[in-house]
């Protein structure tokens, strides 16, 4: 099932998400994860957090493939490519964020048409449960770390536009307000707080 993606302006995106209960039926969890992947691929995203489908729980999915795959002809001699990671992350805890800050133009399925440079640490360590509720503590870097940081922020009620300078925020204010009302082009199903409830 493909969910509608919640647009900026909905309070669920500003809510700190709650841990997923340990006794959630595995079949329900598998279905939710499968639906989130389906929704993410449908919208051509590389990450999707549960608040973006209106559920304030600590779960996100990611497939870094489209961001790290390089055409053979564009590949430089001896270049080390980042391995794509496709995974669901449950009840994640950011253990550390270290390394150099680097900038990248990020976008977000909840904020269609907006891309801005965001600086983040290069290396992270994340503790999380996988889709079988097994706990892992794992280091990530490169694009995978960035996507995880972006999705993790969603669980904390933070959007990438919250991390921009006051000046940038001021410039974007009108555009973001229009998006929240549904005045924006999008090629996947969305839900806008300004329009009332509908799926
Ligand atoms: Ni996002």
Image: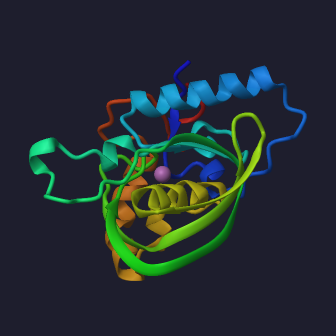
* Percent of width and height locating residue 80: 29, 58
* Percent of width and height locating residue 158: 58, 63
Left or right of 46 on screen, residue 186: left
Residue at 75 percent across and 34 percent down: it is: 132
Q: How many marks?
A: 0
Q: Is residue 92 above or below residue 20?
A: below
Q: Quadrant of residue 151?
A: bottom right
Left or right of 103 on screen, residue 145: right
Quadrant occupied by the C terminus: top right
Q: Residue furthest right?
A: 23
Q: Is residue 98 above or below residue 68?
A: below
Residue at 34 percent across and 75 percent down: it is: 168
* Percent of width and height locating residue 195: 51, 37
Left or right of 39 on screen, residue 20: right
Left or right of 144 on screen, residue 157: right
Decide which of 169, 116 is in the foreground and name it.
116
Residue at 22 percent across and 59 percent down: it is: 79
Decide which of 55, 175 is in the foreground and name it.
55
Residue at 66 percent across and 27 percent down: it is: 32
Q: Is residue 187 above or below residue 167?
A: above
Quadrant occupied by the N terminus: top right
Residue 198 can be seen, yes or no: no
* Percent of width and height locating residue 58: 71, 48
Residue 178 can be seen, yes or no: yes
């Amino acid at each position: 099932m493909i969910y509608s993606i919640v647009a900026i302006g909905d309070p669920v995106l500003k809510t700190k998400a709650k841990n997923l209960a340990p006794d959630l039926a595995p079949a329900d969890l598998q279905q939710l994860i499968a639906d989130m992947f389906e929704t993410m691929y449908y919208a051509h995203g590389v990450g999707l957090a549960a608040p973006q489908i209106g559920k304030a729980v600590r779960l996100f999915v990611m497939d870094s493939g489209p961001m790290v795959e390089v055409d053979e002809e564009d590949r430089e001699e001896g270049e080390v490519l980042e391995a794509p990671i496709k995974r669901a992350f449950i009840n994640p805890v950011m253990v550390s964020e270290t390394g150099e800050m680097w900038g990248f133009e990020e976008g977000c399925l909840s904020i269609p048409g907006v891309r801005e440079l965001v600086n983040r640490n290069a290396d992270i360590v994340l503790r999380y449960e996988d889709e079988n509720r097994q706990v892992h503590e794992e280091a990530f870097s490169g694009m995978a770390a960035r996507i995880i940081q972006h999705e993790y922020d969603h669980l904390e009620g933070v959007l990438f536009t919250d991390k921009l300078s006051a000046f940038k925020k001021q410039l974007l204010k009108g555009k973001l307000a229009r998006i929240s009302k549904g005045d924006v082009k999008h090629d996947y199903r969305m839900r806008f707080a300004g329009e009332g409830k509908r799926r």
